[in-house]
Structure formats: structure tokens, C-alpha cells
Image (cartoon, rainbow, N blue to C red):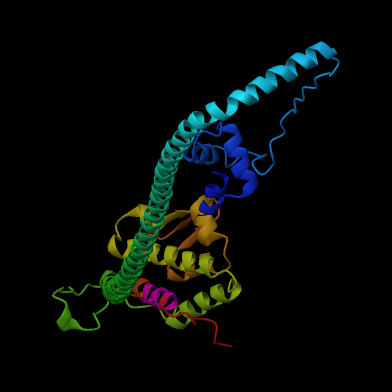
Amino acid sequence: MLGELEVIGFSAVRSIRALHFSGNSNLESAINWLLEHENDPDIDQLPLIPREINIECGDASNETRNDIQAKRDDAQGRKPKESTAAGRQKETSQVERKSSADQDEEEDRRRILELYKSKQDGEERARDRIHSQLQEDKRERIQAAKELMEAKRTLEENQRKRAMETRKADQEEEKRARERIRQRIEDDKAERRRRLGLPLENPAASDTIITPMKIKPVEPSVTSEQLRDCLRNLKKNYKDDSARVTRAFQTLLKIITNIVRNPEEEKFRRIRLSNPVFKGWVGSLQGGVEFLELCGFQKLRASGYLDMPRDKVDMTLLKAAGVEVASAMENPYFGLLSK
């Protein structure tokens, strides 16, 4: 059995250990033991067995030795007769046992080979399954990578298209916004000219009919050049604060426009100098009150008011002043290029 185990492929030490611990019964038991204990830490060590030695002392008496010798002689005398029959029977028994042992050994060898072959077949099938699974996983990964690349390419293409469409829409919206701003500026200019009673730049574009008003002639003491110089000096004095100058011009234009549109309203022709809004936007600026005085306002020191009597309202002068203020607001270089 040790030789059969070594032929199968097990080492001599492992085979000896398996035969010992399986009881030396048969090869199948030894192989099963090896498969169950192949991971034991001492699998490659020979088993250590206690040795038992029985020693008999030879102190028998002479009579005892003589009796034993006599019995041995008698036994030797009977031995030739008995040995013949026993020999035949023993030979027959040995042949039968040998034949049976050969059959059992052959059967054990066949079962062991079948077991070993089935184990190898099972391992081969397991390797094939693992290999097939790995190949399938590899194909799936490749397919997933291809799908991911295609999805990414499609997403980038859609993003580019949306960006182009958004940019085009923004350009169109910007163009429309510029057109609206330009139209609003034109409308504001036309409205300011209409409020001041001035003719439109393009009379055919407007259906508004301006009724001529009876106005007093401009006194020669105040001219458009004087009004322009006053506004020019105001802007020069505060050229580093354009927002303050713009707010002052807007306030002056609003005061003049209110009087032109409502000359009978006293509240538009009377301004309190201590008013916080007027003082902060016009009164505290050098040239603001002076411009209003050129337009016809009178400073009443006793009451602290700027007042324009009804009989002093000069529509021509006020309209000319409104034109100068509007021109100063529209021209960004007004008062900056002159000496």
C-alpha cells in the first residue's frame, strides 16, 4: 500500500503517516485521511511510536528444560505426518488468501484511480468554469467601457450644441436689448423736447401737434451763452464727482420742466433753500443757485426761499435753459474741453 501511494504521487513520509493513522486498513482510507489532513502542520513528519520490548529471564530448572526437550522431540516426531496434511491445507489457504488479496488490492487500486481521476476532472472543470467566467467578465467590461465612451461623446456633443444655441440666443437678446435701449433714448429725447415745447427732430415721425404759445421775448440781460457758462463752471468745479453733477443737472431740469408745464402752480415756483434734498443736490453746489437765478428765480434772504413771481415767468428763457441742461446731460465732454 505504501508503494501504491507513492505511485499515485504522495510523498513517502505522508504515505507512512496516512497508513499509520488510518489503521493500515486499505488505500482508500489512507487517501481520505491524506485529503482531510493535508493542511496539518506536522503532515511531513514521521509519527513517533513508543517501543515496547518484553524480555524473558532464562532461569528454569533442568527438569523443566528436560520436559520441554521431550515435548519438542515428540512434536518433531509427529510433525512429518501432520505437516503433510497441514501443508496442503496451508498451501490451499495461502493460494486462496493470495488470490483474494490480489482481487481486493486490484479493486482498491481501481477505486483509488477512479477517485483520483474524478478529483482531477472536478478540478479541471472548476478551472474551465473560472476561465470562462473571467473571459465573460472581460467581455462585459470591454462592452461597458465602449458604452461609457459613446455616452460621454454624445453628452459632450449635446453640451456643445446647447452652448452654441445659448450663445446665439444671448447674441440675439443682446441685439434686441440694444435696440430697445436706442429706441428708449430716442423716445426720451423726443419727450424732453415735447415737454420743453421744442420742435421734434423728425416731425413726420410724430403725430403730436405743438400749439404755439404766446411768450415774452428774452431779455437781453440773460443769454444762452450765460446759461451754458454757468452749467460748464458747475461741471468743472465737480468734475471728479460725475454722479453728483448728473444728479444736479437732473434736478435743475425737473424744476424748469415743472414750471414750463405748470406756470400757474406756485409750489413749482417757490423753493425752500434749507430743504435737505434741494440743498444736498443743488443748493450746496457752486453754480446751482446761480443757474436758477439766471432762469428768473429771486433769492429772498428774509424768508430763506427762492421765488419766481408769476409775472416774471419767461417761457422762452426757461425753454432755452432746459435745452442747455439737456445738452449738458447728453454730451459726456460738456464743459471739459473748453478753456
Residue 140, horizontal then vertical, whole percent: 34, 62
Asked whether 182 or 291 is in front, the reply is 182
Say how many tags the image has: 0
**In the image, residue 1 above or below residue 248:** above
Residue 162, horizontal then vertical, whole percent: 29, 70
Question: Which residue lies at the image location 36% right of the left edge and 67% below the top edge?
Answer: 142
Q: In which image quadrant can residue 315 be found?
A: bottom left
Q: Is residue 294 magenta?
A: no
Does residue 314 show up? no
Asked whether 124 or 271 is in front, the reply is 124
**In the image, residue 93 above or below residue 309:** above
**In the image, residue 154 above or below residue 104:** below
Q: Report the quarter where the C terminus lies.
A: bottom right
Span highlighted in magenta in the image: 320-329
Residue 128, horizontal then vertical, whole percent: 37, 58
**In the image, residue 62 above or below residue 285:** above
Q: Main secondary structure of the magenta part?
A: helix
Question: Which residue lies at the image location 59% right of the left edge and 44% below the top edge?
Answer: 15
Q: Is residue 323 magenta?
A: yes
Q: In which image quadrant can residue 46 be found?
A: top right
Does residue 214 show up? yes
Residue 84, horizontal then vertical, whole percent: 51, 32
